[in-house]
Image (cartoon, helix red, strand yellow):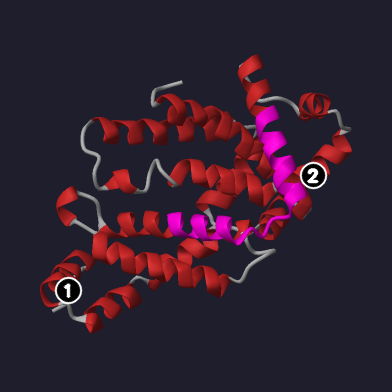
Amino acid sequence: MEYNNAEQIAIYRQTGDIALRNEIVLNNMGLVKACAMSMRNMYIKFGDVDDVVNEGVLALMDAIEAYDPDKGAKFETFASLKVRGAIIDYIRKQDWIPRNVRKFSKMLDKANSMLYNLNGRAPTTAELAEYLKMDEERLLKQMADCSCTITLSFEELLYEDNIDEPVQNAPGDSRLLRDELARVVAEGVESLRDKEREVITLYYYKNMKYSDIGKVLGISESRVCQIHTKAVLQLKAKLEPYFKGGGSI
């Protein structure tokens, strides 16, 4: 007889059988690898995929210990959020990104948020360049360089404290907030310009690398990074009010 994850975990809890726990891990390695590969653009220039997968496996083991089916979440959903959160934390702790890139990404993020709130829309590249007192060519180059940092910041906003634990402990209002967040993310993606929406869709929903996205769209990898950074900044600015005030925009 074959058992699903929840059933196997229930048996493991009763027996403490480490061999069974290891079997559950092996059965869910595809989930870990999928998470690691979908996030590879954040670390591929600096770290090794196998190291990230290993962190994901440790998180999967923690998820097996922490999972409570009575809370209503599927194990696969709970585990994938745990794994993504652990990978984000691992990438951040490695401090792979050069200091000047981190510094610029913070400046860019702040400038984008300020102009977004001031004008009620995403700022243009020209507006960002003027605010940051640099020419557009230099801005575009640095936007490409800091794509992984901006993406990490966005993933932290989504997963670190807001989506990880509440998936099991969030009936009622919290679940409504998650549904509202999903709606706003979808609306944010739809509000992007065509090229930005294409890049975000291929990156997050098709799990494609920047280089492969470039081939599909007929543009350079550097240009994909620039477009991705601009799109993520817009989505981040749109979502921040939820996490600062817990309400709708």
The residue under the point 14% across, 52% down is: 70
Q: Give the answer, above or below, for where 105 lies relative to 5.
A: above
The residue under the point 44% across, 46% down is: 159
Label drawn at residue 142: 2
Dominant SS of magenta comes to helix
Q: Is residue 89 left or right of residue 100?
A: left
In the rendered structure, which amino acid carries the disc numbered 1? Tyr
**Residue furthest top in the image:** 119
On the image, which quarter does residue 189 sit in? top right
Which secondary structure, mark 1? helix
In this picture, which residue range is highlighted in magenta? 84-111
Whole-percent x, y for residue 202 in the image: 58, 50
Q: Is residue 247 magenta?
A: no
Whole-percent x, y for residue 112 in the image: 67, 29
Residue 219 seen in the current view: no
Q: What residue is shown with label 1?
A: 12
Q: Nearer the viewer, residue 129 or 100?
A: 100
- Which badge, 1 or 2, is on the more N-terminal residue? 1
Whole-percent x, y for residue 195 in the image: 67, 39
On the image, which quarter does residue 106 sit in? top right
Whole-percent x, y for residue 139 in the image: 82, 38
The residue under the point 25% across, 60% down is: 66
* Quadrant of the frame with the N terminus: bottom left
Sort mark 2 into few (<14), some (14-19) or many (20+) by Cα contacts within 10 Å: some
Which secondary structure, mark 2? helix
The residue under the point 47% across, 73% down is: 54
In the rendered structure, which amino acid carries the disc numbered 2? Gln
